[in-house]
Amino acid sequence: MMTWKDILAYADSGGPTPPTRVEKTEAEWRAQLTPEAFRVTRQHGTERAFSSEMCSLFTPGEYGCVCCNTLLFDANEKFESGTGWPSFTQPVAENVVAYHKDTSFGMIRIEALCSVCDAHLGHVFPDGPAPSGLRYCMNAVALEKSKDA
């Protein structure tokens, strides 16, 4: 199980080796994604809080990257954070999410990216529920519910 200490270490070191890589041109990403998904995932944007039904969706299933379909999160790790964005306690594997220090807006946060295609997913915070204490606060537009159990 990943901890906040692990996240900080990965943010400093670049993180674990991704399972594979997907690289496309900006034009290819634009052609594949909706304008909002492109803005969030490729330009490091943030969707408006409470703008997606995914926040209140708690049915079993899996969530993948909207850009490259890499499996990122399982619904069993999803919880109601009250923040307006889907939140998870852990990714499905340690090497599917990359971490970068984000110093925008006068604060230090840890940005979460898909390690396979570098899509901006959201941020990770140390205020989640036990046992990990992590809150992966994700943009719903960056995720696709890929499988119902």
Image (tube, rainbow, N blue to C red):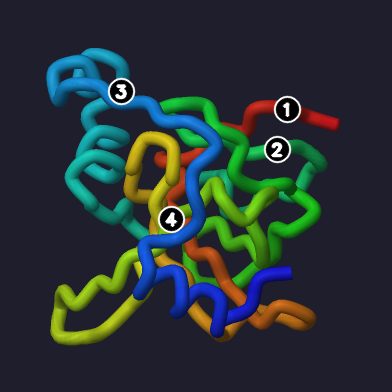
Who is closer to the viewer here, 2 or 66? 2
Task: Identify which residue is drawn at 63% across, 61% down.
Answer: 88
Mark 2–mark 1 CB contact (< 8 Å):
yes
Q: Residue at x 43, y 55 (%)?
A: 98
Q: Residue at x 78, y 80 (%)?
A: 131
With respect to residue 115, does 66 lie above or below? above
Residue carrying label 3: 33
Q: Which residue is mark 4?
A: 98
Which numbered disc flags the more N-terminal residue, 2 or 1?
2
Q: Which residue position is annotated with label 2?
A: 62
Going by the numbered disc 2, the residue's amino acid type is Glu
C-alpha gap between disc 2 and disc 3: 20 Å
Q: Amino acid at mark 3?
A: Leu
**122 or 46, which is in the foreground?**
122
Q: Residues within 10 Å of mark 1 (few under 14, many from 20)?
A: few
Callout 1: SS: strand
Measure the C-alpha gap from mark 2 to mark 1: 5 Å
